Amino acid sequence: MTATAATTDTPIGPFTAIVDAEGCVLASGWTATIEDLQPLIHKSLRPSDIRMVSNLGSITMAIEDYHRGELSVIDDIPVAQQSGEFLMHAWKVLRTVPAGSPVTYSEFADMAGRPAAIRGAASACARNAAALFVPCHRVFRIGGALGGFRWGLPAKTWLLAHEAARGLSAPTVG
């Protein structure tokens, strides 16, 4: 399978997305290189070839609009990820966490229907290949510590502040 990829400049640095032939995001994040993203794609979905393009149409537009403050534009962008049943479900649940209303890993585990699976919830965030579109940046540790973020804590801090600044309430994290 051949996929396409494009890099978009954002206030937190270059953002690259890899998209399959059906227009689903396979992997994305704040990087200028597809080499950082390819290993994140599940083997069953991994393209044999990735063609760089200058623009991914509605996906590039959503990336630009989100970073300008239109937070909901990422909600309907299709994503393709593959894993076990819990992670697949957890990624769907992550897409329901509202911008400006981040949750703790415990709350996320509860939302995913497994209150005791806090490590599983953290694993869902860590293994998420489609950053931004599956907004794992909206999950933090109890007590307000940010936890981890593949694209760096400065990026996570920026994203949370960006969402909070749009008139939505957010807890103080740090």
Image (cartoon, rainbow, N blue to C red):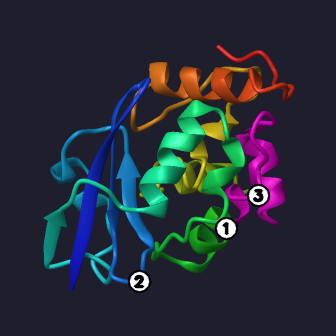
Type of amino acid at the residue the image marks with label 2: Glu
Mark 2–mark 1 CB contact (< 8 Å):
no
64 relative position to 17: left or right: right
Mark 1–mark 3 CB contact (< 8 Å):
yes
Front residue of this view, candidates 84 and 4: 4
Name the mark on residue 44.
none
Name the mark on residue 96.
3
Tell me the SS state at disc 1: helix
Type of amino acid at the residue the image marks with label 1: Lys
Which residue is identified by label 2? 22
Residue at (22% x, 48% y) in the render: 36
Residue 37, image x and y in percent?
Answer: 27, 54
Q: CA distance from mark 2 to mark 1?
A: 19 Å
Q: Which corner quadrant holds the N terminus?
A: bottom left
Residue 121, image x and y in percent?
Answer: 64, 53
Residue 59, image x and y in percent?
Answer: 46, 59
Mark 2 or mark 3, earlier in chain = 2
Does 143 lie within the magenta span? no
159 relative position to 61: left or right: right
State which region is magenta. 92-114
Q: CA distance from mark 2 to mark 3?
A: 23 Å
Type of amino acid at the residue the image marks with label 3: Thr
Residue 100, image x and y in percent?
Answer: 78, 33
Which residue is identified by label 1? 92
Mark 2–mark 3 CB contact (< 8 Å):
no
Front residue of this view, candidates 31 and 39: 31
54 versus 51 height, above or below: above
